[in-house]
Image (cartoon, grey):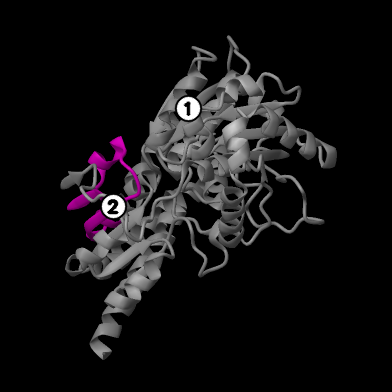
Amino acid sequence: MGEVIHKSNKPLQVNPIKLSQPMGAILAFLGVDGCMPLMHGAQGCTSLTKVYFTRHFSEPIAIQTSAVTDAIAVLDGGDYSIVEAVKNITKKVTPSLIGLHTTGLPETKGDDLRGVAGKIDYPLVYVNTPDYEGGLESGWALTCKALIEQLVAPAKTVDDNRVVLLPHVSLQPIEVEKIKDFIESFGFNVLALPDLSTSLDGHLGVKQAALSSGGIKPDEIRNLADAGLVISVGDSMQAAAAALLKKNSVMRHQHFSHLQGLEASDALAELLLAETGFSGPPVAVARWRQRLQDAMLDSHFSLGQTRFLVAAEPDQLAGICQALHDVGGKVSVALSTVDSPQLKKIRAQLVMVGDLEDAERLADQYDLIVGNCHCEALAQRLHKGLVLRGFPNWEQVGNQLKNDLLYEGSAYFLFECANAATAQRQHLQAS
């Protein structure tokens, strides 16, 4: 671990990579089956988010808005606009749950979200997500915590065959599915909260739905407190795990900062072996471990002579940097969207909260960028290699099926980075 800069000394962000809390909240609500996210804010905020995620996932995204205008912002405390929005939604569709969350405008004015929610006679979860605080990661985490606090019923006993998975926001739908499959291969029944693996995984439905299709069901959320084991992935999810443990003191909790690379995958396998008492892992798990070991050897030569800049949300940043470090890659700069306790654990020479202007200023310190599609113009201008990861990726399709986790995904990730690094060196030699 190297130097950590928790706060930029610049008065503003230039070419930012940070996303807002309401966007994280919407993603979390889309991981609940039949849920309708309701953004309490201006119409443009909702439109931007809808287009943003539609382009990333190449899927229609269901979102509604309370359509706060300048007049409503001054005269209404949220009572009228939110209540009317719920009435309009329920006239057209019947959501299993309405996910009410805020933006900066009503939060600045001080709308009483809890008070308004108490007046609505419909299944609803509310969460305060001002976009002048936090980012995508914290918006997701706050929403997960709200779902637990407002829906999960307390319990006193546990079923040791049940596991609750709390994934961080940067995990693509296939990655959530792969973690669930990994745990289930040891004989457990797994529920993820939120669960994008069956809602935004890119499956072809019968027709375009007006509500989120797939994800964890509200009834399943209500019964989460009887699971024997809670597994949280990403430091942003620790508060949600603590909220769930308050529902049942008998539950056990195991936290992982990330699940990328050999060491983290081994730690999860060892936990599941200890929980089950099995003498060894399933055959497929053992085979993929051997494949990752071979992938580390194969990619070491290329990655070991490459300097990286990684730009991502803190939890994703930790996993990517660790995976690259394990095979000799030198992460010169780790660029985080927001501050987080996770930053002090990241394997990089310089870890900083910043933007792509900072990345351009430090251009002589790296050869290859790992980041979202906003890094593409930077990479082309500076003649750097690029591996696309994170939100958004509007330049490629199939984002929901990119897996970088556990033994299997880590092998794929290392191969992709090694091939990109080799291609970049060949390009520079030819030019």
At 26% from the left edge and 45% from the top edge, which residue is drawn? 346
In the rendered image, the vertical position of residue 241 relative to residue 206, given as above or below: above
Instruction: Give the tally of numbered discs.
Output: 2
In the rendered image, the vertical position of residue 368 relative to residue 283, given as above or below: below
At 73% from the left edge and 39% from the top edge, which residue is drawn? 34
In the rendered image, the vertical position of residue 417 relative to residue 210, given as above or below: below
At 54% from the left edge and 60% from the top edge, which residue is drawn? 399
Decide: few, some or many residues near mark 2? Use Cα within 10 Å; few <14, some 14-19, many ≥20.
many
Q: Name the N-terminal-most of marks 1 and 2.
A: 1
Give the camera-side residue of 359 and 8. Answer: 8
Task: Return the x and y of residue 179 as percentages of the image width and height.
Answer: 51, 43
Task: Return the x and y of residue 163 as percentages of the image width and height.
Answer: 55, 29
Decide: few, some or many residues near mark 1? Use Cα within 10 Å; few <14, some 14-19, many ≥20.
many
Give the camera-side residue of 332 and 335. Answer: 335
Give the camera-side residue of 181 and 173. Answer: 173
Residue projecting furthest to the left: 3
Task: Return the x and y of residue 402 as percentages of the image width and height.
Answer: 51, 59
Q: Nearer the viewer, mark 1 or mark 2?
A: 2
Please say whether residue 1 is visible from this viewpoint.
Answer: no
According to the picture, the residue beneath numbered tag 1 turns out to be 240
Quadrant containing the N terminus is: top left
Residue type marked 2: Gly
Identify the element where label 1 is drawn: helix
According to the picture, the residue beneath numbered tag 2 turns out to be 354
Identify the element where label 2 is drawn: loop
Residue projecting furthest to the top: 156
Residue type marked 1: Ala
Alpha carbon distance from label 1 to label 2: 26 Å
